[in-house]
Amino acid sequence: AVGPATLLIRPESVRLSPDDPAVEGIAGTVAQVALIGDRYAVIVEAGSLRLRATLLNDPGRIPIPAPGERVRLHWRADDAILFPGHL
């Protein structure tokens, strides 16, 4: 079908990497980082979109980006659900 659609991805399924044009994904700028329990909520602005990633607070595993840092957001295809129309 052709028309509007909504792509849903759970925030914990979103991965962040440094902004590298060779890496597939959505480029954006970190707008906000908040520690919530054992996880960080990272808000990334990409054009008119505000996207959220949830990262475990594990300093040895993945660096937590700082506000203003350029990153790429990506996810596995089977972590995304496409719904027709707007939700």
Image (spheres, grey):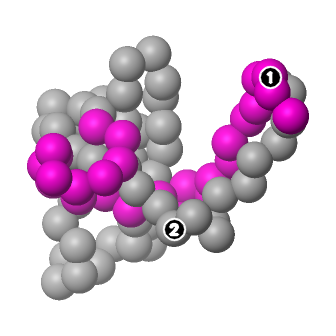
- Label 1: few (<14), some or many (≥20) within 10 Å? few
- Above or below, 48 against 46 in this view is above
Q: Is residue 87 among the parts visible in the rendering?
A: no
Depth check, front residue: 21 or 67: 21
Residue sitting at the far top:
48
Which residue lies at the image location 75% right of the left edge and 47% below the top edge? 82
Query: What amino acid type is highlighted by mark number 2?
Result: Arg
Q: Position of residue 70 (x, y in %)?
A: 17, 38
Confirm or deny contact between disc 2 and disc 1 (CB under 8 A): no
Q: Dot 1 corresponds to which residue?
A: 3
Which residue lies at the image location 17% right of the left edge and 83% below the top edge? 60
- Above or below, 72 against 58 in this view is above
Question: Residue 48 occupies which quadrant of the picture?
Answer: top left
Which residue lies at the image location 35% right of the left edge and 48% below the top edge? 25
Q: Position of residue 34 (x, y in %)?
A: 37, 47
Q: Quick check: is 10 in the magenta stretch?
A: yes
Q: Quick check: is 13 in the magenta stretch?
A: yes
Depth check, front residue: 55 or 27: 27
Q: Dot 2 corresponds to which residue?
A: 76
Q: Which residues are magenta?
A: 1-27
Q: Position of residue 68 (x, y in %)?
A: 16, 31
Give the CA separation, mark 2 to mark 1. Answer: 24 Å
- Label 2: few (<14), some or many (≥20) within 10 Å? few
